[in-house]
Amino acid sequence: HPQLTVDPTCGLMLEGVALNAIADSVGTPCWVLGAGTLRARMQRMHTAMSNAGLDVSIHYAVKANDHLAILTLIGQEGFGADIVSGGELARALKAGIPADHIVFSGVGKTDAELEQAISHGIGQINVESAEELEAISAIASKLGKQATITLRVNPDVDAKTHAKITTGLAANKFGIPFQDAAALYAHAFTLPGVRPVGFATHIGSQILTTAPYRAAYARVAELVHTVRAAGNAVSVVDCGGGLGICYRNETEGQPEALAGAIKAELGGLGVKLAIEPGRWPIGPAGVLLSSVILRKAQGMDVPFLVLDTAMNELLRPSMYDAWHGILPLAPQAFSQPVSLTHVVGPVCESGDTFARDRLLPPLARNARIALLDTGAYGAVMSSTYNSRPLAAEVLVEDGQWQVIRQRQSVEELWQDETVPSHLAKAT
Ligand code: LLP
């Protein structure tokens, strides 16, 4: 984590900014994102692809972190977006990402979302079923347009990742079964509202080795040869996202190795390539700051550290048993002896647990910690469960920081709720 350093007087810093200073001013819980880390990692991906001699468009997967500031930065760096809903499309457009740099993925797109996408002239729609293909053609025809499409194929390849984030197995809901793809592609050319350009695949997330990628891309290459032999043109292959990061002690996925896998399997096809990374560029750019509410030790074999952040902010540990690093913010804590600690949130569920048996220094009430690698699938997966307002967000860049999302007020929690008048009268 080159973005994280420990200063002997200021404690933990992100991109040279003291996290304690942010917490003093904004309070906790608070998400902090490092723009420099995000930019550097996006550029590393871009460089890896061009150094391999590949013509690859990079479409950032908006779902990983959809903050307007992040999308604006992504657009300014010249990258496109991969979206999965009308809301994400609206955000990407609002952030200034041109419609023709936007790709629409997802297993269920509503009529309204498809209309919105097609009328804005979206770059490409990745079609996930025969049924959806018909719907897109009908909607585009009605609008007097043709939608540029690829077929997302399910290559039936095991990405060897957590079951809840695996998408490329035949048993998963995603994509068109491999054996149906060639015939459906040929059929697409007969439909008036679509312009078929190629194939897409995405086999899962937090993938750490290239073997599953190579297996998936080899199948896509086979498909390209099959449909070309049948006389149908292919000019695009979208290679999906999924490159994994280091949360604990894993060797993080390497963009250069991904570029190598793409080149080896797809490099000779003469197609325009694309990738859709979400977690890799932004995951390590973010931390979640929290304060200790109390250390519950009496009568416990291992004490519980109860934080002021919970599963409603960071869902990943409860949902995927995900491991996130935890560091204290105070400088002196880094030289204190560590002991086993369970780290939990205050929400009324046993699943509201961030870590069990973690080695941590003694942290008393109001001591602060950072949960690491929370830039991706962090704030975006928050809820207000237990009437906990959404946390503040801060962006760090060039040694400066600023709030990019005010902490939600308690009143905002119910501002869209209505109490029917007959009930209101009774109270
Ligand atoms: N493209 C498609 C079609 C996707 O479904 C996804 C992620 C991506 C790209 C980006 O994948 P990435 O590069 O971020 O791995 N909430 C889970 C991760 C869910 C990923 C869903 N799809 C987590 O916190 O681990």
Image (tube, rainbow, N blue to C red):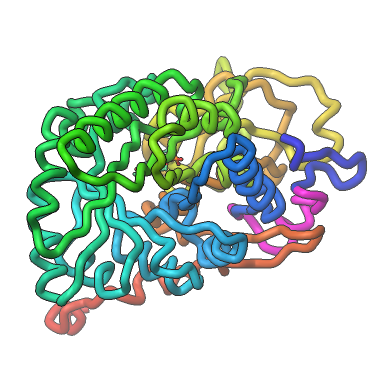
| Residue 424 position within the rendered picture, expressed as x and y whole percent measured from the top left | 20, 81
Quarter of the rendered image showing ligand 1? top left
Q: Residue at x 29, y 25 (%)?
A: 219
Of residue 268 and residue 421, the one placed in the foreground of this image is 268
Which residue is at 49% across, 50% downward? 57
Q: Nearer the viewer, residue 151 or 325?
A: 151
Q: Position of residue 64 (x, y in %)?
A: 46, 49
Q: Quadrant of the N terminus?
A: top right
**Residue 315 image offset from top left, x and y in percent:** 43, 41
Q: Taking 235 as reference, is 310 left or right?
A: right
Which residue is pictured at 60% across the width and 31% down the height?
256
Q: Is residue 234 magenta?
A: no
- Say whether residue 29 is magenta: yes
Q: Is residue 102 left or right of residue 234?
A: right
Q: Position of residue 117 (x, y in %)?
A: 28, 67
**Residue 191 seen in the current view:** yes
Q: Nearest the camera: 192 or 165?
A: 192
Quadrant of the image occupied by residue 342: top right
**As drawn, 74 above or below 158:** below
Work out which residue is located at the far top of the displayed protein and give it. Answer: 301
Instruction: Decide if residue 291 is in sight here.
Output: no
Pick the residue in front: 90 or 358: 90
Number of numbered markers: 0
Quadrant location, the C terminus: bottom left
Q: Picture quarter containing residue 392?
A: bottom right
Instruction: Establish if 98 lies above or below 229.
Output: below
Give me the residue at 68% from left, 41% from top.
Answer: 369
Asked if residue 198 lies left or right of residue 337, the reply is left
Residue interval drawn in magenta: 15-30
Q: Quadrant of residue 371?
A: top right
Vertical side of 348 occupied by 60: above or below: below
